Amino acid sequence: TLWSFRKGETEYGVKGIPLGGFVKIVGMTPLEEEEEEVTEADKKRVFWRKPLWQRTVVLAAGSVTHFILGFVVLWILVSFVGIANPERAEAYEQSQQTSTVDVAECIPPDDATIDFTCTDAHEPSPAYEAGMRDGDRIAAVEGTAVTDWDSLLEAVGGLTPEEPVEVTVERDGAEQVLQVTPYAAEVQLEDGTTETVARFGVSVYLDPSIPATVTAGPVDGIGETASFTGDMFRETFVALADLPSKIPPLWDSIWGAERADDTPVSVVGASRLGGEMVQYDQWAMFFMLLVVLNYFIGVFNLLPLLPMDGGHIAIAWYEKVRSWVAAKRGRPDPGRVDYLKLMPLTYAVIIVLGGFMLLTITADIVNPITIFN
């Protein structure tokens, strides 16, 4: 303890090793009651003697606070700041089914960031220099028909950089043939290696009339926030179920393999990502990260495993059900659960979580995930 003070019967303090906040209440487990010097008068006030509903409220309070904080921040984003427009995402997916393109005015440098802007100092992109414009549909490359984004990538990727090719485009219902000289671009493959491929300087077309973000207002925002919260809770459980499959690629990333964007991050990685978002003034993304973290931690803490609060809640309700069943069958109350028998499982959970924490922290230091590069 670095610093603490007492108010009433509660002690508040700061620990030297910042592993999070915690609350210890006498009588949460039989072991704690035996370790504490509890007076006869206070034995009637220990935690396990309180009504089940009160114990449940106290144990769930931390997670509920996470949920409330996440909901409020999300409501502010949905109502006033704006979140990613789902219609834009849908339009993006639809655009991938066609070969209609957005045209970059210049070739972005290797260190281009999200706020990169073309200037006269940058070389024009091959597509722009050839006269291609936003909304054009590429119909063929060197006589090879193109129907969607995948076929366009395949057709362009097979070209030789710096060698002019004929590209047939459709604009306003009319076709025209353009001479395009692709440039050489380095792309990273799934195995972490790089490959030089030809590129025109085009991307998936997005209708500029569809806003990137939308706001719902304070009243409609409540319903929208509830809907988004449901989606996030569902995705949280999916992520928890997929967590074991993410450990091998996370381990491989420590030894030089490419770090996948969907691998878990520690508080170190989350802080790094949050710092990037602030650096590039992506405040909406920053606060959305805060929402996701609060929801995830809240759900994770309610898992029915010791030493998490969810484990204590599960045991409390198990004791209640077991006592009710015994009373119905005319048998004596079996009493409280023997925590000593659960200690091996508790230690196993602590070891697994501790190892996972060290693994994610190491990966976030050695091979961090970056958003803007």
Image: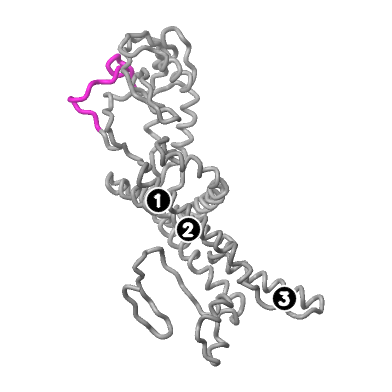
**Percent position of residue 27, x then y:** 55, 79
Q: Which residue is label 2 attached to?
A: 297
Apparent side of residue 314 relative to residue 267 in the rendered image (left or right): right
| Residue found at the far left of this picture | 121
Judging from the image, the colouring scheme is: one colour
Disc 3 designates what residue? 323
How many marks do you count on the picture? Answer: 3
- Local crowd size for mark 2, using a 10 Å CA cut-off: few (<14), some (14–19), many (≥20): some
Check the picture and name the quadrant holding the N terminus.
bottom left
Residue 153 position within the rendered picture, expressed as x and y whole percent measured from the top left? 43, 20
- Determine the secondary structure under disc 3: helix
- Residue placed under numbered mark 1 in the picture: 361
How far apart marks 1 and 2 lie (CA) works out to 17 Å
Label 3 or label 2, whichever comes before in sequence order: 2
Looking at the image, is mark 1 or mark 3 earlier in the sequence? 3
Amino acid type, label 3? Ser
Q: Quick check: 185 left or right of 52?
A: left
Give the magenta range: 117-133
- Label 2: which secondary element: helix
What amino acid type should be assigned to the residue bearing mark 1? Answer: Ile
Quadrant into which the C terminus falls = top left
In the foreground, 171 or 199: 199
Residue occupying the point 50% across, 64% down: 63
